[in-house]
Amino acid sequence: MGQTIIEKIISNHCGKPVKPGDIVDIVIDVRLARDFGGANVVKNLEENNLEINDPDKTFFTFDCNPGGSDQKYAANQQICRLFARKTGVKVYDVNRGIGTHIAIDEGLAYPGCTLVSTDSHANILGAIGAFGQGMGDQDIAYAWSSGKVWFEVPQTIKIILKGKPSDNITPKDVVLRLLKHFGANGLLGFSAELYGDYIENLDLSGRITIASMATEMGAITLLFPPSEDVINYCKQVSGKMFSPVYSDEDAKYEDVIEIDLSDMKPLISLPGNPENVVEVQSIKDQKIDSVFIGSCTNGRYEDMLTVARILKDRKVAPGVVLKIVPSTDAIWKRCLQDGLIEIFKKAGALVSNAGCAGCADGQVGQNGPNEVTVSTGNRNFSGKQGKGAVYLASPETAAASAVSGVITSVDKIFEKPVTFPILKSTRISFQKNKVEFSSSKETVIEGRVWIIPIDNIDTDMIFHNRHLAITRIEEMGKFTFGNLKGWEDFPQKAQRGDIIITGKNFGAGSSRQQAVDCFKSLGIGAIIAESFGAIYERNAINAAFPILKGNLKQILKDGDLVKIDFSSGIVTKISTGEIFQIKPFSDVQMNIYKRGGLLIKD
């Protein structure tokens, strides 16, 4: 009995013939870990005293958060860098782009090889007829230390794409057609091979687009028999001699499915479920706020070139934000060299550094509540690309929609873009705090003292910038002093009504209001400092949060109970009756305090 492509690849990498259902150890040719999961791979290796099997086959790829704009990603990336320095593992750092694309374009992977990564879309390697798999941190750590992983040989389904689609049908439309046919689990646990005239004539970029969405159908992989062009490209970039793998004529398939492409029209996935696919024209004129073009699905040079042709001599519709992210730095540079970046910028697009972008939390491409986005990514699960509604479409549909201001296909671009109406009576709805944090407006308060004898406590120490996206006051308290050494547990110890006494220049640094509101969240009664940062002082006064100037940190001690009169500036130590004078509220501060804040009308 002959073998399918996946059966042959696995047989070649375990040293014996296999059949579906066999569980074998597979030698892994290329072993990747991203910034997402990479630090945990390191943790697993070091905690179990495991060595690297072959550093020359082992790589870090930082693609989820290029630039380390998120503190946790930055920390994880540095953990990986330090580990790489002592082990010889190579790092494709934040300036390089998406790891699976790098693996193809730099010749790490080649037809017939095996690759694992902490990327669930590692099966994109099916585009070159290779076996790629996304795996968890422990699997990857094992592969790094042993050079192999166990795997169950999947059954294979043969998919034949029949008919010739019209010229305005793209590979993204085709994979959305497959997704509509199979749904989210129609290929669950299967390997699938793709055949037909359309497939034979498809370039590498188109194969990557289709292969990248295998995961969205539940497939282990979508495998393309390598074309001559793909083989020549892989030989050129890898410098290796390899034998591409094809299925045998008598290979056994679990099923053979034919899908007709001849009557296709441009397709789009509705928000929330990639498999909820409809024709673009069925939702035409849907107003949009933003467009994202990029990701491992549609960040290739060919995608960029197509978008540039649509944007040339056009402008992004007023009020619409267009974000474009090439998949690798090499593609970015080619776009710059060929004038594509200039076209993008003239059209009004934001062009970011190469990486996963909108698919990964923390980089360009995220959207906000109620924002309607057209994305070329592979997933539009709720919350995946932000808090708005995400439609999945081809780069052509995305670019056409960006200049039209509404969802439309490339053959129906609006001559005059649709703009947002001015709705003077419309109010933006904000979720109200569950707890009222405004002061009781009592001008005399009592509370327990906390002495923090430190000068120049800045706003990053008070409320770190990694939490700045938080807007609800009730959520802020638990992060108070989270970056002040020795005081990280203050939120757990503080009680409502407590009074902080500290040194000079409290609240130095940024203008972030959260550095005031976190104390309101905890119910802190007041802060007495020798002096305050200028912006911080204004923020606190305007928020009706009691701050006063005085030097009491050498006079009082932790736990003392005191009474403070804001109008007179008299501080009384309740246990002894001792009285201390500090600067009272000014008339302006008292007026704002009694009103409950600068923006509260009398």
Image: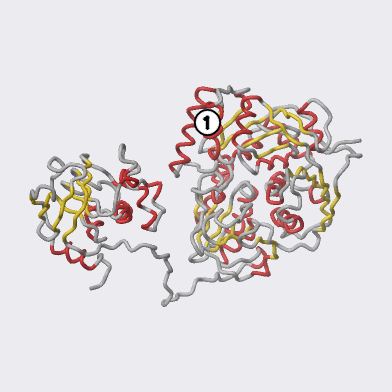
Residue 116, image x, y percentages: 66, 35
Q: Is residue 67 left or right of residue 446?
A: right
Few, some or many residues within 10 Å of mark 1 (<14, 14–19, 20+): some
Q: Is residue 523 above or below residue 229?
A: below
Q: What element does badge 1 sit on?
A: helix
**Residue 228 placed where, x, y %?**
78, 38
Q: How many numbered circles are shown?
A: 1
Q: Which residue is mark 1?
A: 43
Q: Is residue 20 above or below residue 26?
A: below
Q: Where is the C terminus found, in terms of image quarters?
A: bottom left
Inspect the image, locate mark 1, and give the three-letter code of the amino acid beneath it. Lys
Q: Residue at x 19, y 46 (%)?
A: 501
Task: Name the residue: 56% across, 37% down.
Answer: 34
Q: Depth check: 600 or 567 in front? A: 567
The residue shown at (62%, 53%) is 379
Q: Position of residue 445 (x, y in %)?
A: 18, 58
> Looking at this view, is 270 or 205 the one in front?
270
Q: Quadrant of the N terminus?
A: top right
Dividing the picture into quarters, in which one does residue 190 lie?
Answer: top right
Most distant residue in the front direction: 575
Relative placement, left or right, of 394 versus 3 is: left
Residue at 61% across / 48% down in the picture?
Answer: 299
Q: Quadrant of residue 208?
A: top right
Picture colour scheme: secondary structure
